[in-house]
Image (tube, rainbow, N blue to C red):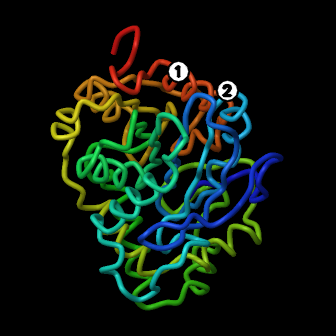
Amino acid sequence: MSRPPTFTPPPGARAHRLHTPRGEFAVIEAGAAVKGTALLIPGFTGSKEDFIALHVPLAAAGYRTIAVDGRGQYESPGPRDDESAYAQDELALDLLAQAHAVSEGGGPLHLLGHSLGGQISRIAVLRDASPFASLTLMSSGPAQISPSQQERVKLLRDALTVMGMEEVWEAIQALEPPEETATGALDEGLDDSADLRRRWLATSPAQLIATGRQLCAEPDRIAELAAVGLPCHVLSGDHDDTWPVSVLDDMAVRLRAHRTVVREADHSPNTDQPEATAQALIAFWDGVDSRNGVRDGR
């Protein structure tokens, strides 16, 4: 669970609904596509607000940014009791619909997925890579999450089958130190707030149960992704309990990907160190040619 510094869009950004053939999705959009467009996909228990500190620096560098609440996440509608609506393929098809909706006139489209969002992004690319100029996997590993995090997610899934979202929220607040999150990432400097509670209560429990199961059982499909040939970027903090940094290093080698380690950041470098994260994304995207891959050597 990323903890954004605010839920208020920055100056120049706007919150609106993205219309696609697969339904409407709540988004925050900023900037003009001088160089291209970035589609930002949040992780487990997260939302579009997780990228809120990235919009201004990415817009200043010439990138239009569109951060999305996926189906059943926060302000995007989704069934609360039908897990089949959140099958991985369904979420990947949603992502592809979002990509087509934002791609017209937006220049090269760069896809970024954080944690669970990275795994959904990977499946979308394996289905159809044609909309995308590049893929950034941010704190998103090659297969299932670490054993310790599997235990935590299983506890959450089990609780959601017998308790309401309000009850689970209160239990999390009672049991977790303030800086710990539901997926093990360490967040500092922000107390629990009405915004975080509102996001939690608005998220579909069926979405959390279904995607939590996916995180605990995801197979390794890195060889398939490498064969697609899409320019890739593996970005993470220098500490991560969900996928160890050494695992992410190895994945980057297997993908022949650009690799960035953001110092003094944990599972959510987008909120821990947004300026350094933005600069790493800009450097990667600036080096991507939409037809020929990465210039100056990948």
Q: From the viewer's perspective, is residue 78 above or below residue 44?
A: below
Residue drawn at the location 58% of the way across and 73% of the way down: 172
Label number found at residue 182: none
Inter-mark Cα distance, 2 to 1: 9 Å
192 lies left or right of 117:
right
Q: Which residue is mark 2?
A: 61
Q: From the viewer's perspective, is residue 158 above or below residue 177?
A: below
Residue drawn at the location 54% of the way across and 29% of the way down: 281
Residue 194 at x, y percent in the picture: 76, 72
Element on which disc 1 rests? helix
Element on which disc 2 rests? loop
Amino acid identity at mark 2? Ala
Label number found at residue 286: 1
- In the picture, residue 216 is in which quadrant? bottom left
Residue lying furthest front: 105
Residue 224 at x, y percent in the picture: 16, 40
Amino acid identity at mark 1? Asp
Residue 87 at x, y percent in the picture: 29, 71
In the image shown, does 180 or 254 lie closer to the viewer? 254
Q: From the viewer's perspective, is residue 51 above or below residue 202?
A: above
